[in-house]
Image: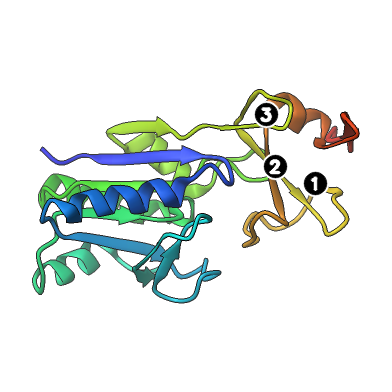
Amino acid sequence: MAKLYFYYSTMNAGKSTMMLQASYNYQERGMQTLLLAPDIDNRDGDNIISSRIGLSAPAISFHTADNLYSLILSIGRKQTVDCIFIDEAQFLEKQQVKQLSDVTDELDIPVLCYGLRTDFQGNLFTGSEQLLAWADELTEIKTICHCGRKANMVLRIDADGNVIKQGAQIKIGGNDDYISVCRKCFKSGMIKRRNDELMLEGFDE
């Protein structure tokens, strides 16, 4: 029986690398994978998923208004689909998570979603919230805060390294815009190490 999986983490934890490796493992065994990614994030160009260590693979971009069940059903009529991978799953809409659950339940195709859990203000993304509720299996991909604790939160910073506390939930960026930190450093705004001392920005508001 197929399942809906959600692999979640903070920024720069290796989500895309893990996803591309998993897709390769399927393909190495003669299975056909389908990679999907929201068109809201096109840092690597349209119709491609890339990781920080240089791995990449072609993908099909979708819009927030797209019906993913219909899209996958249409693709499945033209080619074999043994497993589906969703990159940046935090950007899924509520109805799209339900559609992916229909893919697993009705088409019997496993769907593996990879994405962030929370935004820079500590709030759940819509896609992540729905996946936490609907997924059959949840797996945290772990990374480390600069203080040595497990990083489970994300801080947004400006060009000068200052913590940004307000703004739109979605701002596409990478290493220069976000830092993964533990909850304690998230609360205090400790963002980087300089001469073995943590810079304190404050995140009380």
* Sooner in the amino-acid sequence: mark 1 or mark 2: 2
Q: Nearer the viewer, residue 28 or 135?
A: 28
Q: Give neighbour class at mark 1: few <14, some 14-19, many 20+ (Cα, 10 Å).
A: some
Tell me if 72 is positioned left or right of 78 in this view. Answer: right
What residue would you read off at disc 3? 182
Residue 201 location (% of width, % of height) = 89, 38
Amino acid type, label 2: Gln
What residue would you read off at disc 1? 165
Q: Which mark is residue 121?
A: 2
One can see residue 96 in this view: yes
- Do the numbered discs 1 and 2 sit on residues whose CB atoms are within 8 Å? yes
How far apart are the alpha carbons under marks 2 and 3?
A: 13 Å
Tell me if 175 is positioned left or right of 132 in this view. Answer: right
Please give the name of the residue rendered at 74% of the width and 26% of the height, measured from the top-left corner. 147
Q: Nearer the viewer, residue 178 or 143?
A: 143
* Sooner in the amino-acid sequence: mark 3 or mark 1: 1
Please give the name of the residue rendered at 30% of the width and 32% of the height, measured from the top-left corner. 137
Residue 96 location (% of width, % of height) = 34, 56
How far apart are the alpha carbons under marks 1 and 2?
A: 7 Å
